[in-house]
Amino acid sequence: MPMNWWIRMTDSHAIMSLRLGVNIDHVATIRNARGGRHPEPIRAARLAVDAGADGITAHLREDRRHISDNDISQLMAELECPLNLEMAATDEMLNIALDHVPNACCLVPEKRQELTTEGGLDVFGQRDQLAPVVGKLRDKGIRVSLFIDPDFDQISTAREIGADIVEIHTGTYAEASFNGDDDAFAIELKRISMGAEFAAKLDLEVHAGHGLTYDTTAQIAALRQIVELNIGHFLIGEAIFSGLDSSVRRMRSVMDRARAGISGVKSA
């Protein structure tokens, strides 16, 4: 199921919508802490969609620390919205993706010892490894996204090896905000803005994500070249206090208001 541009009505104005993909990995993390079936990622996915998510993201890691193979099978069988499968560019993950054929695959770097994805792919340095994976996924009709830092060399190489999408890593930007480092925050926001503009000029679809919160999403959502945000850990964390429905609806509101230019947000 392709995810194309569509129009959302906000405050009586038609605006070009920004899609929200909700990552449900950490619902599975909670389940796996004790074992058994609960909480169920598929239930979280349905709740997120009902609350305003346009798609669901799930990262199937080599060590299966959260999402499992059975989760992917269930999501593919029961979801009516697009599934974005995050994965490393390994033979194992490629075969799983080709077997299930999700709407999109986002290739990400992966280290067993990391707590979460620590940065973008080195597409420039690993083009010979990545290009065949991109080609095989696209041959199966799967849209391919590369998770990268907002670096021109990485972006142009992504275009050269046939990616449909780049997802800009916002982790450094979010960390600067958390640390109260205004200079670093401004620098990273400018890098993201320039990277998004450059990617769009190369006819790449531009997504963004990692570490975004209510406080840091609006500035990214205001960048018109970005058409999708993928957010997970923060929304699942907020759901503990307010419920998943509430956290997704609030994030959806932050995004829409920023996109409509009614939030007082100044983009880079």
Image: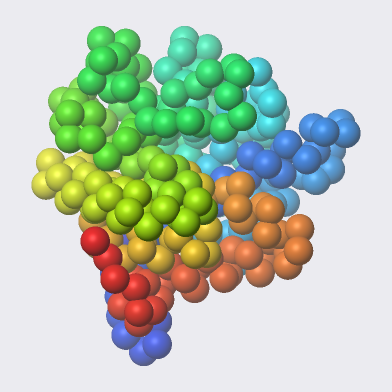
Is residue 214 visible to us here? yes
In the image, is 53 to the left or to the right of 31?
left
Looking at this view, is 153 or 127 the one in front? 153
Residue drawn at the location 73% of the way across and 36% of the way down: 29
In the image, is 48 to the left or to the right of 176?
right
Residue drawn at the location 59% of the way across and 17% of the way down: 112
Q: How far across and down, in percent of the image, does residue 174 sit?
A: 45, 50
Q: How far across and down, in percent of the image, does residue 169 sit?
A: 38, 40
Q: Quadrant of the C terminus?
A: bottom left
Q: How far across and down, in percent of the image, does residue 104 sit?
A: 41, 37
Q: Which color scheme did the rendering employ for the protein?
A: rainbow
Rendered view: 115 above or below 261: above
In the image, is 260 to the left or to the right of 28?
left
Residue drawn at the location 32% of the way across and 85% of the way down: 13
Q: Report the number of numbered marks.
A: 0
Is residue 136 visible to us here? no
Rendered view: 83 above or below 107: below
Q: How far across and down, in percent of the image, does residue 134 sit?
A: 31, 22
Quadrant in the rendering for residue 19: bottom left
Residue drawn at the location 36% of the way across and 25% of the way down: 121
Looking at this view, is 106 or 118 the one in front? 118
Rendered view: 8 above or below 125: below
Rendered view: 247 above or below 130: below
Q: Residue furthest bottom?
A: 12
